[in-house]
Image: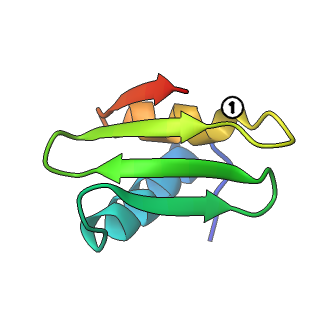
Amino acid sequence: MNYDINTTEGMANSVAWTENLFSKMAEGGSWMIPRSMTIVKVYPLKKEVEVKRGVRLDKSIEQVIKAMGWKVTII
């Protein structure tokens, strides 16, 4: 499956994958992305996330979540 967010198909696949993940998470739940050690706190009822950046900047996380129409706050 194509997850290259620089393509229409890849962004759509990435959004769908992330929406599926977030739909299973509780309000205030955390998602840790190992490749960058980024922690995302998820608030599905408000469609908001708080992103605590890790050791490596990974803008793709923000890009996909914003493409979902969610608010992203960097902490």
**What residue sits 65% from the left and 38% below the top?**
60
* Residue at the farthest right position: 55
Q: How many marks do you count on the picture?
A: 1
Inspect the image, locate mark 1, and give the three-letter code of the amino acid beneath it.
Lys
Which residue is found at the position 55% from the left and 27% from the top? 75
Q: Quadrant of the N terminus?
A: bottom right
**Residue 29 in the figure: left or right of residue 36:** left
Question: Residue at the spot x=76%, y=54% of the render?
Answer: 37
Vertical position of residue 12 compared to residue 1: above or below: above
Locate residue 73, reporting x and y percent: 44, 25
Q: Which residue is mark 1?
A: 59
**x, y percent for residue 66:** 41, 31
**Along the line of sight, the residue nearer the viewer: 66 or 32:** 32
Q: Position of residue 50 (x, y in %)?
A: 45, 37
Q: Please tell me in which quadrant of the rendered image residue 48 appears.
A: top left
Please name whichever residue, 67 or 50, is drawn nearer the observer in this view of the structure.
Answer: 50
Q: Is residue 15 visible?
A: yes
Horizontal arrangement in the rendering, residue 70 relative to residue 58 (left or right): left
Which secondary structure, mark 1?
helix
The image shows residue 14 at horizontal and vertical percentages of 52, 55
1 or 29, which lies in front?
29
